[in-house]
Structures are given as C-alpha cells and as structure tokens.
Image (cartoon, helix red, strand yellow):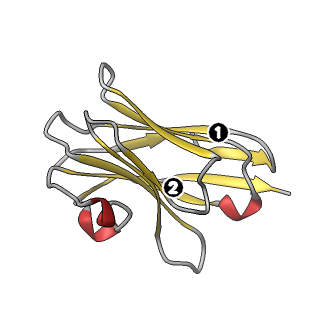
Amino acid sequence: QAQLVESGGGSVQAGGSLRLSCAGYTYKTKCIGWFRQAPGKEREGVAGIYYGIGTTAYAESVKGRFTISQDNAKNTVYLQMNSLKPEDTAVYYCAATMGWIPPSGIMSSSAYNSWGQGTQVTVSS
C-alpha cells in the first residue's frame, strides 16, 4: 500500500484559498480521492481523479470552487480550494487505490485502501 502524506492545510478567512498536496502514491495507483471530516460528521468525498487518465469528479458542494489535479512528474495530486466557506472547515484526507473504481463509487471512502494522516483546514467567517 502507498504511504500517503498530505500537506498545505491551514487557517484562512472566508473567500480565501488553499492548495492541498498529496504525495506518496505509486504508478500502480488507479484512483486518488480527497475526503474531509468535520467534527461530529461522517467522512465525505470531496473530489477524485483517475490517475494518469485525469478524469475528475466533485461533490456538489465544492463544484466550481475546488479543483483536483495531478503532476505525474512529481507523483503529487493537488486540491486547489478557492472561495472557501466556514462549512469547508474539516480535516482533509487523501486516499488512493490500485483497484478500479467505477465513476459511481469514486466518492466512496470504502473504495480506497491507502490513507494519509490528514491535514486541518479551518475557514473563519
């Protein structure tokens, strides 16, 4: 399994931007996803990308504000988060899998078997 490491979290005011990075996956990875978990809430999928192919998917709550991308040369996946809202406050995790995930399941945490430790994102109003 891949050893994933997230970075880039922090505290910003509403309307601000942050870019999260996820490194440590291998060329055998098929799909990488970003998830988040706020206190007292279940973990939810935010965005996913098919490694190498580049096809992406987003949760409705972040469409138009977040962008997931990959840098194959650096084996790094990014989550660019713009127009942040207080409700985006959560611990953000990246996850990877070497198995195929259908598009309907790319936002499902059970489809992934490698996880990073998480990075805190706090958005103040």
Rendering quarter of residue 28 = top left
- From what the image shows, is residue 120 above or below residue 69? below
54 with respect to 29 (left or right):
right
Q: Residue at x 30, y 66 (%)?
A: 105
Q: Does dot 2 land on a helix, a strand or a loop? A: strand
Q: Name the outermost residue toward the top.
A: 73
Q: Name the outermost residue toward the bottom.
A: 40
* N-term mark: 2 or 1: 1
- Residue 58: % across, % down: 49, 55
Q: Which residue is mark 1?
A: 18
Q: Does dot 1 land on a helix, a strand or a loop? A: strand
- From what the image shows, is residue 99 above or below residue 68? below
What is the three-letter code of the residue carrying label 1?
A: Leu
Does the CB distance between marks 2 and 1 fall below 8 Å? no
115 with respect to 66 (left or right):
left
Q: Residue at x 34, y 68 (%)?
A: 108
- Residue 39: % across, % down: 60, 74
What is the three-letter code of the residue carrying label 2?
A: Tyr
The number of numbered discs placed on residues in the rendered structure image is 2
For the residues labelled 2 and 1, the Cα–Cα distance comes to 12 Å
From the image, which quarter does the C terminus lie in?
bottom right
Q: Residue at x 54, y 41 (%)?
A: 67
Q: Which residue is mark 2?
A: 92
Around disc 2, counting alpha carbons within 10 Å, would you say few (fewer than 14), some (14 to 19), or many (20 or more)? many
Around disc 1, counting alpha carbons within 10 Å, would you say few (fewer than 14), some (14 to 19), or many (20 or more)? some
* Disc on res. 89: none
